[in-house]
Image (cartoon, rainbow, N blue to C red):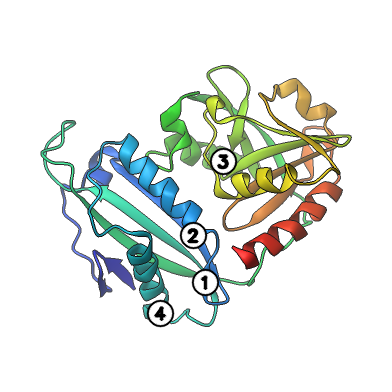
Amino acid sequence: MINFNGIITDKPEFSSYNRGMLYGDAVFETVRYSSGKISFWEDHYFRLMASMRILRMEIPMNFTLELLEAELLKTINASNLKDKSASVRLTVTRNAGGKYLPEDNNVSFYAFASELNDPFFIMNEASYEVDLYKDHYLNADLLSTLKTANKLIHVTGSIFAKENNLANCLLINTNKTIAEALNGNLFLVKDNHIKTPPLTEGCLRGIVRKQLIDILEKIDTYTFEEAPISPFELQKADELFITNSIMGIQPITKYRKKLYTNLVAKNLLGKLNAKARLG
């Protein structure tokens, strides 16, 4: 079932002139629902509002944190997932009209839910090999940090990964440093030091990235920094792992001839699950 502007339907009426379809003029959030609540909803909401402001969309007065949460829960209930775990995608598009220049900046939204197998983040220890995707570079700018409907680099990179029997790829930015993975933020571990690219590298302003940074800043076990990651650092690292709001933490097991451990990822996953239950 689809929630289209607050109406539950299995046949949403999308305009042929939908700006998300024509120009990628849309932003979205994918949230995790479990045990009757949406994990880190407040952070998702404020990221969505910030993205809409950056794209100069008109934010409706009724687009409150409470209203959009209620609409997502309504979507979950209509999909018979109230007592299960689910991922929910909320997309906001600028209304139809105009060409590159919109006729107005008002918006519509739609949401749908899909069932998840696990009620909390779990550690996937299966083989997870990655390589660099070098056909296209990610811009190291503000727009790259947003979850917009324009994700062609991620789409073509995913096809490349499949064609080469890879689980994922790492994206290089216009500075020739590593920005992120196809589906999440990258963290690198060397000894007891952890680093992740700063937002100025063009990586996604990830919600789980934000939660892990908060965790790392409050414990003495590791030192942490936001700093560019060179491709040459990858083979010197002890661990690499990817984060996003649905899978939590995904350890990378292999990059080219380098094999990695996952001890730090396991430790942080427990702390992340505890934070998700509280948040």
| In this rendering, the label closer to the viewer, 4 or 1 | 1
Q: Can you identify the residue that label 1 sits on?
A: 37
Along the viewing direction, whichever of 165 and 228 lies nearer the viewer: 228
Tell me which residue sits at (52%, 40%) in the image. 205
CA gap between label 4 and label 1 equals 12 Å
| In this rendering, the label closer to the viewer, 1 or 3 | 1
The circle drawn on residue 77 is 4
Is there a contact, CB below 8 Å, between mark 1 and mark 3? no
**Mark 1 closeness class: few <14, some 14–19, many ≥20 residues within 10 Å:** some
Q: Could you say which quadrant of the image residue 177 lies in?
A: top right
Mark 4 or mark 3: which comes first in sequence? 4
Along the viewing direction, whichever of 62 and 229 lies nearer the viewer: 62
Is there a contact, CB below 8 Å, between mark 1 and mark 2? yes
Q: Amino acid at mark 4?
A: Asn
Mark 4 or mark 2: which comes first in sequence? 2
CA gap between label 1 and label 3 equals 27 Å
Q: Amino acid at mark 1?
A: Lys
The circle drawn on residue 167 is none
Does residue 130 lie above or below 127 as drawn? above
CA gap between label 4 and label 2 equals 17 Å
Q: Position of residue 150 (x, y in %)?
A: 37, 38
Q: Position of residue 105 (x, y in %)?
A: 18, 42
Q: Amino acid at mark 3?
A: Leu
CA gap between label 2 and label 3 equals 23 Å
Evaluate whether residue 166 shows in this view: no
Q: Amino acid at mark 2?
A: Trp
> With 43 as the anchor, is 232 left or right in this view?
right
Q: Position of residue 88 (x, y in %)?
A: 45, 64
